[in-house]
Image (cartoon, rainbow, N blue to C red):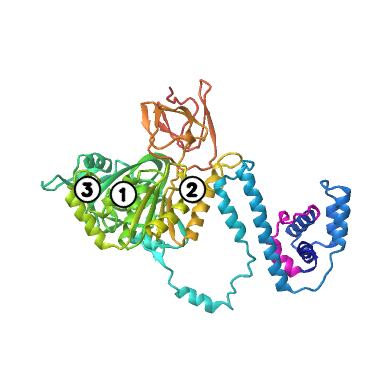
Amino acid sequence: MRIEVTILSNLIHDDEYSRQVIPFIKKEYFSDRVESVIAEEMLNFFDEFNKPATKEILKIQVSKRRDIGAKELDDAEKLITGFTATPINFDWLMKESEAFCKQRALYNTIAQSIQIIDGRDKQYSPEAIPSLLSEALSITFDSSVGHNYIEDASERFDFYRRKEEKLPFDIELLNKITDGGLPRKSMTCLLAGCVHPDTKIKIRTKKSDSSWTEQEVSIGEIDSLLKDEYQIEVTSPDGFVPISLFVDKGEWEEYILTLDSGIEVRVNENHLFETDKGWQYAKDLVNSPNELYLTEGDILIQGNVRNTGKVIPIVDIQVDHDNHRYYTNGVSSHNTGVGKSLVMCHFAAANLLHNKNVLYITMEMSEERIAERIDANLLNLGMAELKTVEQKIFNNRIEKLRGKTIGNLIVKEYPTGSAHTGHFRALIEELKSKKNFVPDVIYIDYLNICASQRMKYGAGVNSYTYIKAIAEELRGLSVEYNVPLVTATQANRCLSLDTVVNVEHRGNIEICNLNIGDKIQSHSGYVDVTEIYPIMEQEVYEITLKSGKTIQCSSKHIFPTSTGMKSIDSGLKIKDFLFSI
């Protein structure tokens, strides 16, 4: 008797066997047409009624099908009649059934791979083949039936005391949130936030050997001060602490902290305030009137956070201090994320100082730009100073760094949107063989401008499915190499992917085909594309102009109007005037 018939027969007569095997069986594993039809009906019945079908039920269900002829129906009835409850060694049957499923999955994957290579598969690209083959080879029947709370208590006790190897952050808040840092075989995704540019901060500035000058400025003024090569320090609960960078983060939904003293701080949802209960996000503080906020002089004052629904500009600064905090309008705030690339460069630098091998993959900036940001973290030099520092001083600091760590850091650049886990895997193997470099942590800058190894965008693959596939593949890479993987994404609001924009030297293209560095036409001329934002599915609105033009966008997309910046959520309405060209 063939193993296929033995499997089908026992799926009827052995309840324990069917419950363990059915989750792994597919009708495609049966090459014989009649056996495949019977298997499909068995699986459908079990899925609906949670019990094996009888021979009588199978005969009735097969007879209802309109996709088989009279001879196949006759063969099916004869085969079903011959299914008998023959005693058989259960362990042997499970072993042979697992081998059958693995062999058939591999055979089918090879056949599918040929279709992919020939271009007949519309879902997968050729780069997906290694992953599909690996998936087929990894098929195994899981014999575990779960954790027995009472019987497995001893194993659970040992688990609690087993110290999981983690890669610590150099920011104590993040170590607290993650219980010690990044575990192996994990993927961590970063978001960021901060304050309105009008927010007041107290700083002191100086140039070269001049003395410090103290003043109160809007945080938005830090950009020009840094460009004018001032050294800047800002007040914090830790005294004056250095500022090394200013970042414009675009427009976000507004949250306002109002203290009982009358002080207000305008921020976005991811901004962190220091309270008597520790650091907390603005979005988590809405309608929490009993919180006490740390203010200048280590005074705790009660306040309330509300979401106004308005959209405001948001900026941030990089504070070079272990606690990463500073006063905004006199309230202690946390500098955790001035930009996804900056944050990842900071973490990568800290990992290197902890004697780790770091692989930093960038698809947004050049290798030199990433290295520049890491230099700013490790060499105690500001971004502006790196352009003027003497080579002797620079070389001396590199040598001092060499003596502080046994780790290494590799930065590899790929074109935006062109690289996937297949390329990353090949890079890791090449570094291992040529440089004897094995990463302890991998940074991918960043998720939404990677490509998927398995899927081609379009042809039934939407943006959600595509980005989800990329995330799954990156998570798989971290598991395969037993390392933490850190990447980033950014919540955003924007336009339909097929929105047409005009790009200098490229003409009219769909917005989804933009690249970093393109110059895109705007109301004020051509401006640089400096960011490629995440693709995500959102509810779509269509705006129709008097000219007949239509724009598809999310409810949060911001338009300049004759009465200010507006989105549908913040009051854009019929008869508003939009600028056009």
Q: Give the CA separation, mark 3 to mark 1.
A: 31 Å
For badge 3, the amino acid type reads Lys
Question: Relative to 228, does residue 501 appear above or below in the rendering?
Answer: above
- Tag on residue 266? none
Q: Position of residue 195 (x, y in %)?
A: 33, 45
Mark 1, residues whose alpha carbon is within 10 Å: few (<14), some, or many (≥20)? some
For badge 2, the amino acid type reads His
> Label 2's element?
loop
Residue that mark 3 sits on: 202
Which quadrant of the rendered structure holds the C terminus?
A: top left
Query: What secondary structure predominates along the stretch shown in magenta?
Result: helix
Q: Position of residue 44 (x, y in %)?
A: 75, 55
For badge 1, the amino acid type reads Ala
Give the mark, 3 or 1, whose residue is nearer the N terminus.
3
The answer to whether residue 189 is visible is no
Of the residues tagged 3 and 1, which is closer to the observer? 1
Can you tell which quarter of the image residue 99 is in?
A: bottom right
409 or 295, which lies in front? 409
- Tag on residue 371? 1
Residue that mark 2 sits on: 420
313 or 523, which lies in front? 523
> Label 3's element?
strand
Question: Relative to 249, does residue 474 appear above or below in the rendering?
Answer: below
